[in-house]
Image (cartoon, rainbow, N blue to C red):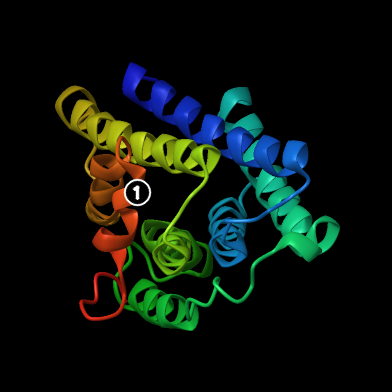
Amino acid sequence: MNVFRLTGDLSHLAAIIILLLKIWKSRSCAGISGKSQILFAIVFTTRYLDLLSSFISFYNTCMKVIYIGCAYATVYLIYAKFRATYDGNHDSFRVEFLVVPVGGLAVLINHDFSFLEILWTFSIYLESVAILPQLFMISKTGEAETITTHYLFCLGLYRALYLFNWIWRFYFEGFFDMIAIVAGVVQTVLYCDFFYLYRSLPRITSMYMIGDKTHHP
């Protein structure tokens, strides 16, 4: 494992922990898109269906369990324990506009036309756009809590580090996965605006406004 993958995984884990702590400590899920969290739960579920049938390493298995467990814990906190604080009115992104095209693309473009491979490909494509409901929600409210921006920053950092991971693996291991790379680039591009806005949060509204000028689907 190279340093880019390790730091990328740690950034991803940090993002998840930041979000869970934010919800638990504040006893509120205000500003958090439940739809994005459901999409991430679907991503991890469809990607790690081989959890019980294959073993790569202790580290790999632990990370899979943590990702799945934390994803469903987050969904539970939003839609059950702290449901009264969930802002469903602003979390109105039409996720079917993501899931249906991504599902069709996974069937058409994959490495192998098998059930598990199609689901793995589906998870890769879906992860690249799963954050859109969260960004859409920020655009509607025109604001985001500091903790939410830290969460998004860590997610963006995770994707950027994984791009370097793929470059490293191509040069030193000969590894090249076009599906994962293209999806990763798309996801990183979606975070680019947020990286720019990270130090000047009040400008989020003007950059992501979905009214006169559409920025996201």
Compared to 54, does 92 lie above or below?
Answer: below
In the rendered image, residue 158, in percent from the top left (x then y), is placed at 38, 35
Furthest toward the front, the residue is: 202
Q: Quadrant of residue 212?
A: bottom left
Could you tell me which secondary element the residue under label 1 belongs to?
helix
The quarter in which the N terminus is drawn is: top left
Q: How many labels does the image show?
A: 1
Residue furthest out toward the top: 3
Q: Is residue 39 left or right of residue 99?
A: right
The answer to whether 145 is drawn above or below residue 166 in the figure is: below
Q: Residues within 10 Å of mark 1 (few under 14, many from 20)?
A: few
Residue 65 shows in this picture = no
Which one is nearer the viewer's eye here, 9 or 48? 9
Residue 116 image point, x, y percent: 52, 63
Residue 58 visible in the current orientation: yes
In which quadrant of the rendered image does the C terminus lie? Answer: bottom left
Q: Give residue 23's quadrant in the image.
A: top right
Q: Is residue 66 rendered to the left or right of residue 159?
A: right
* Residue pictured at 31% horizontal, 75% vertical: 210
Residue closest to the far right: 81
Which amino acid type corresponds to the residue marked 1 in the rendered image? Pro
* Left or right of 181, for residue 204: right
Image x and y of residue 31, in percent: 57, 56
Location of residue 109 (image quadrant): bottom left
Q: Mark 1 points at which residue?
A: 202
Question: Front-most of 204 and 179?
Answer: 204
Nearer to the camera, 12 or 35:
35
Q: Can you give x and y, in whole percent of width and height, for residue 41 in the image?
A: 61, 57
Q: Which residue is located at x 70 percent, y 50 percent?
A: 74
